[in-house]
Image (cartoon, helix red, strand yellow):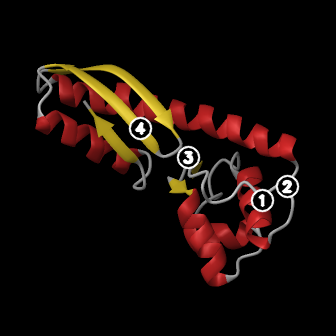
Amino acid sequence: MSTGEERRRLVCRCMGVASPRIYAAVRESGLTSVADVTKAVRAGGGCGLCHPEIEEILADARGEPFDPSLALENQLVCRQETLSRIEGSLHSLIRPRIEALGATLDAVSVDGLRVRVRLGGVADARAARLVAEKLREYVCEDLEVETG
């Protein structure tokens, strides 16, 4: 079962590496192992929780089947860990900065690399720009951040 690159996701939360960057490195450099991926793009060089996802990407790039139950488990772990990383960054690092501008964090939703943050209070373009810039800096530069 091929998961395909269409499932864009933050794979390595420690190093902030998303699936498109891993797929590109695998294709361009012929990477065949998690160690190769770690050397090339740093993914997998932290806690190791993303190693199964990297294995899934490697299998997909080779056109090999990957156990659907493991793919689902990877997807669930990835979703939960990504949300946790984004929420942690928002609440501990970003919220104090936007509150100083008069804005509040009202809601957040995450779908793959797309993050939607609803701001309240006196939310202006500066607060929205700050949220987007800091999420990309603290979590992953490939995030698509929408604020409103």
The CA span between labels 3 and 1 is 16 Å
- Residue 97 or 23: which is nearer the viewer? 23
Residue at point 44%, 42% (across, down): 114
Left or right of 124 on screen, residue 67: right
Image coordinates of residue 119 in percent, x first then y, are 25, 24
Of badges 3 and 2, nearer the viewer stands 2
In the rendered image, the residue lying farthest to the bottom is 29
Image coordinates of residue 140 in percent, x first then y, are 44, 51
Q: Vertical placement of 71 versus 128: above or below?
A: below
Of badges 2 and 1, nearer the viewer stands 2
Q: Secondary structure at mark 4?
A: strand
The CA span between labels 1 and 4 is 25 Å
Q: Which residue is mark 1?
A: 55
The CA span between labels 2 and 1 is 9 Å
Q: Which residue is mark 4?
A: 115
First in residue order: circle 2 vs circle 4: 2
Q: Secondary structure at mark 3?
A: loop
Kindly indicate the quadrant of the structure image that contains residue 35: bottom right
Q: Secondary structure at mark 1?
A: helix
First in residue order: circle 3 vs circle 2: 3
First in residue order: circle 1 vs circle 4: 1
Left or right of 2 on screen, residue 119: left
Residue at point 78%, 45% (across, down): 71
First in residue order: circle 3 vs circle 1: 3
Image coordinates of residue 72 in percent, x first then y, are 77, 39
The CA span between labels 2 and 4 is 28 Å
Q: Which residue is mark 2?
A: 66
Residue at point 66%, 74% (across, down): 26
Q: Which amino acid, mark 2? A: Phe
Q: Which residue is mark 3?
A: 13
The CA span between labels 4 and 3 is 15 Å
